[in-house]
Structure formats: structure tokens, C-alpha cells
Amino acid sequence: MSIRTEKVASLLQRELSAIFEKELPRSGPLATVTEVKVTADLGIARVYVSIIGSEAQRAELMEFLHTETKALRKILSSKIRNQFRRIPELEFYEDRLFEQANRIEELLKSVRRGPAEEQL
């Protein structure tokens, strides 16, 4: 990525995180913007969201994000309109990296415990 796209991605991540903190319902799952990738023409921003909650809550929140993309883009526009001519289209993706890391950690722990238990 170029310096410009990195700066735009960083700004979008910061602003979307603030929007998520203020706009999303508190009773639902915890959602965090983990990464934003912006295309070279700054037309599309792919937003990766880490969600902590049950599978049903995750699916519900992702559905909410997909249906409310225009509203979220409008809120984002009101916050950063002085810095952009055109606000990028938002695409939301669930980031399951945290879950995968936990799964790998558990597997490594079980492998480490295995030989130690055999020696006893």
C-alpha cells in the first residue's frame, strides 16, 4: 500500500472505531475494527471487524452492518467530509483471527502437556 492509502485506512479505522463505540447497541456483542484496507483508487474500504459473542450474535451484528452500511457511511461522512472529496464505499468482513489464534494456542498447550503427562 502507498503512504496515502495507509493514512486513509488508519483514519477510517480510527473514525469507524469511534462510531462503533457510540452507535452500536451496548446490549449486543463486543465489536472492534481490527483493520481497514483501502483500494488504490480510495473507492472501496474493506473493514475487518472482530466480534466477541455467540455465533447468533455475530451473525446478527454482521447482518446489521451489511444492512446499515449506508447509514454508517453517512455518519462517517459527517465526521471526515473536510478531509475527503468522496467517502469510500464500505465493505464489512468478520475477522476471526483472534479465534484462530486462540485455537492454535490451545493446540500448542495440549501438545506441550502431552509429553509431560507421559513422563509422570
Image (cartoon, grey):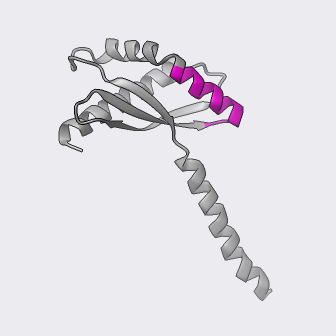
Residue 78: x and y in percent read: 33, 11
Q: Is residue 56 magenta?
A: yes
Image quadrant occupied by the C terminus: bottom right
Residue 88: x and y in percent read: 31, 23
Whether residue 54 is visible, yes or no, is no
Task: Kindly identify the residue that appears in the image at 49 percent across and 19 percent down.
Answer: 22
66 sits to left or right of 106: left
Location of residue 12 (image quadrant) = top left
Task: Kindly identify the residue that appears in the image at 43 percent across and 14 percent down.
Answer: 70
7 sits to left or right of 61: left
Query: Is 47 rendered above or below residue 100?
Result: above
Identify which residue, 5 or 113, lies in the foreground: 5
Q: Is residue 9 magenta?
A: no
Whether residue 24 is visible, yes or no, is yes
Task: Kindly identify the residue that appears in the image at 22 percent across and 31 percent down.
Answer: 41
Image quadrant occupied by the N terminus: top left
Residue 63: x and y in percent read: 59, 24
- Which region shows up in magenta? 52-66
Residue 28: x and y in percent read: 65, 25
Residue sticking out furthest to the right: 120
Location of residue 96 (image quadrant) = top right
Task: Kindly identify the residue that appears in the image at 52 percent across and 23 percent down.
Answer: 65
Query: Is 3 rendered above or below residue 114?
Result: above
Magenta segment's dominant SS is helix
Counting the numbered discs, the total is 0
51 sits to left or right of 22: right
22 sits to left or right of 16: right
